[in-house]
Amino acid sequence: MDNKEALAKRKLAFSENARRQILHDQLRDSSLLSRSASTNIALRQLQRDQCARDDFLKEIETQEEQAPNSSLVEHGLRKLREIIVAAGSNICRDPKFLDFATRVYEKTVKYYCKHREAHKSYPSIRFYVDNLLQHAISNSLSQQMVACCALYISHGEGNLTRCLTLLNSHMLNSDLYEPSKTLSLVYCIQNQPPSVWFKVVSELPDSSLIRIFISALPAFQKMQQRTMKMISVCYNQLSVSFLSVYWFHGMWKDLEHYVSQNWTIETLQNSTKIVKFKAVGSKKPSTS
């Protein structure tokens, strides 16, 4: 290797390290469009350069892998969402920008769901549906964003009419239309047994955004408690395995612990565990 080639490689390595440092400093920079009277150079670069936006999103993903609970991840995602919101209508029609924006909102939803704060992602979901969906190519992820929006309206706000209106407007031809509609109807008006609700959730792909979202909503726990309250009134006893498989379709991992805190469990000689709902001394379940 001659001196020129070695020098070129050193320059390239230095340039790459410098780029990474700039992105890392950008992530640690507390400035936001919503808080700045005038945008700094780093923010202007994010506004103007799609490559810079893509690189910054990768830096956020790297930070999340290294420190999943870091506040820098939430801050970085907010910074990018503000860049997206501030973008003009023309750029919103750019396929590359739309793909980037969709990934940012998907990452936002997953972040808040992982931290059991799914409700915080709703403003982002709502913005996507109201402002970006009309320009986006109809695909699985965009349809899942609509489904999440509809499910929050029904399960978070209790507004079935608005939920169905949104589904009918955007998802009539989607595979997610029937699952989203069924979940909302069962939750809001209880038109079918609650076991149907858990069955629908269990049939959604494990890694799908809609399953991650609905499982993180407070409504999920409410459905668990509602179902157990109904079962305890209707049955004298049931096996734990039957409860888990038939009523909750494997969607309640610590079911046995919850049951043991509220009712008597008897273990038979064949190791079958029976919940005695009417046994003397059994406590009433919490409905809060």
Image: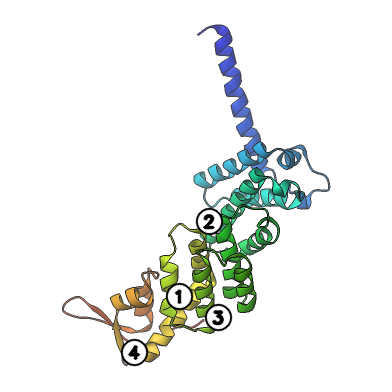
Asked if residue 71 can be seen in this view, the reply is no
Q: What's under tag 3, amino acid-wise?
A: Cys
Would you say the residues marked 1 and 2 are in contact, meaning their CB atoms lie under 8 Å apart? no
- Circle 2: is it few (<14), some (14-19), or many (20+) Cα within 10 Å? few
Asked if residue 225 can be seen in this view, the reply is yes
Task: Give the percent coordinates (x, y) of residue 99.
Answer: 61, 47
Front of the two marks 3 and 2: 2
Closer-to-camera residue (239/131): 131
Helix, strand or loop at disc 3?
helix
- Circle 3: is it few (<14), some (14-19), or many (20+) Cα within 10 Å? some
Q: What's under tag 4, amino acid-wise?
A: Tyr
Residue under label 2, please give it: 140
Q: Residue furthest left?
A: 269
Earlier in the chain: of badge 3 and badge 2, it is 2
The answer to whether residue 222 is left or right of residue 160 is left
Helix, strand or loop at disc 1?
helix
Helix, strand or loop at disc 2?
helix
Q: Residue furthest top?
A: 2
Which dot marks residue 235?
Answer: 4
Which dot marks residue 188?
Answer: 3
Q: What's under tag 2, amino acid-wise?
A: Ser
Tell me the distance, in whole angstroms, between the alpha carbons under discs 1 and 4: 20 Å
